[in-house]
Amino acid sequence: MDPLQALRKTLSQLCADVMSVVAPPVCPVCGAVLVRGEEHLCAGCLSRLERTGYASVPGNPMEQRLERLLGKHVPALALSVYTHGEVSGRMVAAFKYGGARTLAVYAGELLGEALQASGRFEGYHALVPVPLHPSRQRSRGYNQAAELCRGMQHTCGIPVEELLVRTRATRQQASLGRQARLQNLQHVFAVRKGAHVQNGRYILVDDVFTTGMTSATAVDALYRAGAREVAVACLCAG
Ligand SMILES: [Zn+2]
């Protein structure tokens, strides 16, 4: 390392140390000050993340739901059960509504580790984030699913390809009945112009899996464009 580089490194370490005294980083879930060795989440919250165990279970409830919606089997995994007010729910809220972008990357690393450890998701060509409508992405500043993908790539090594676009905004799903939700999502996703999807094997990535309709619609768009196989990975399912 040349002297200038060494000086820069020392100064940036010094700045980080000063910042950690002035405004110490806190756990976005419980608010505890993070200690050395803790990154993004405190050790307590990390250990309380509710694991579904879906990753290693063929025919898990996510896969059953997708099969009912799509009429075909789709391998699927989730890291955590989404329970509002509990650890994973608060973690998602922090990066979805609280601007905690690097937390989404970190959560993606956890999801990528689960995917890798399951041994059921091998030979896929790319991770494909569920896209946000451009207007929502502008107001949030980023797409949390794309940030999850970046983290996943760090730990499972599968590249990210933003193959899908959202062609129109959707109304908030939670307030709609099942039939209205289906209509709301029809033709919402399309493959990006010029993207080569033919014969590819993809893992669709989203933050939350509830009714499964968003995932199913995006999976369907990839199959219609000629994908050979599509799996689904979501951080939270419930
Ligand atoms: Zn915590």
Image (spheres, rainbow, N blue to C red):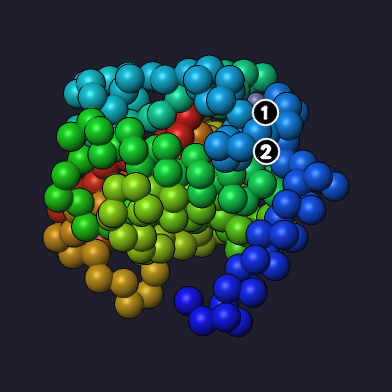
Dividing the picture into quadrants, the one containing residue 150 is bottom left
Q: Is residue 33 left or right of residue 198?
A: right
Q: Which residue is mark 1?
A: 29
User: Looking at the image, which is closer to me, 173 or 115?
Assistant: 115
Hey, what amino acid is under mark 2? Answer: Ala
Label 1 crowd (10 A; few <14 / some 14-19 / many >=20): many
Expressed as whole percent of the image width and height from the top left, the position of residue 63 reads: 28, 27
Dividing the picture into quadrants, the one containing residue 169 is bottom right
Which label belongs to residue 131? none
Q: Is residue 184 left or right of residue 199?
A: right
Q: Residue at x 73, y 52 (%)?
A: 17
Hey, what amino acid is under mark 1? Answer: Val
Q: Which mark is nearer the camera, 1 or 2? A: 1
Q: Are marks 1 and 2 in contact (CB under 8 Å)?
A: yes
Q: Is residue 14 left or right of residue 216?
A: right
Mark 1 CB near ligand 1 (8 Å cut): yes
137 in relation to 216, above or below = below
Residue 90 at least partly seen: no
Q: Which residue is mark 2?
A: 94
Expressed as whole percent of the image width and height from the top left, the position of residue 203 reads: 30, 47
User: Looking at the image, which is closer to me, 72 or 30?
Assistant: 30
